[in-house]
Amino acid sequence: MKPTYSDAIIALGIEGAFSTKDGKITKWLTNETQPSEEAIQAKLKELQADYDAKQYQRDRALAFPSWQEQLDMQYWDKVNGTNKWQEAVAKVKADNPKPE
């Protein structure tokens, strides 16, 4: 899932609880040192960049045949001497390349 404001706070190592509304902290429920808004925004930007960089993974996951279909392809490839499974996987990877 797309990273949230709360994800950024948690990624900063804040163990305490907090309440949010509309993506902003409304109340801290801890005595722990609270991160600055700048630190939260910087971490959120970092998490978003990582999320964006992995879009190809989410696209591939949707495009791959189910595990059951893939196992069936592998079985029939072995029986028939074909390589349909390999071709199907290669097509998904070619259609959704990993960024360099």
Image (cartoon, rainbow, N blue to C red):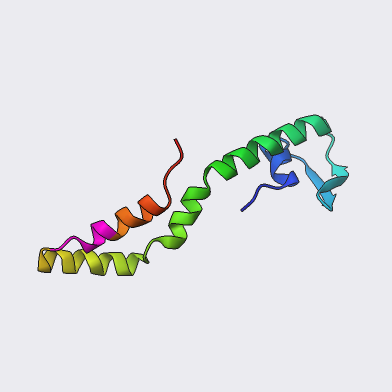
Q: Which residues are magenta?
A: 82-87
Q: Quadrant of residue 64?
A: bottom left
Compared with 14, 63 (above or below) is below
In the image, residue 51 above or below residue 33: below
Check if residue 54 falls in the magenta segment: no
Q: Please identify the quarter of the rendering in which residue 81 is found.
A: bottom left
Residue 69 at what x, y percent from top left? 31, 69
Asked whether residue 34 is in view, the answer is no
Q: Horizontal and vertical percent for residue 40? A: 76, 35
How far from the left and from the top, in percent, is residue 88? Answer: 30, 60
- Our reading of the magenta stretch's main secondary structure is helix
| 82 lies left or right of 43 | left
* In-image side of 22 versus 11 (left or right): right
Q: Which residue is at a point 70% across and 34% down the rendered structure image?
A: 43
Magenta stretch: includes residue 86: yes
Residue ID at (82%, 30%): 36
- Residue farthest along the right direction in this orientation: 26
Viewer-closest of 86 and 39? 86
Q: Position of residue 37 (x, y in %)?
A: 82, 34
Residue 77 seen from this side: yes
Q: Nearer the viewer, residue 25 or 38?
A: 38
x 64%, y 39%: residue: 47
**Residue at the spot x=30%, y=53% of the render?**
90
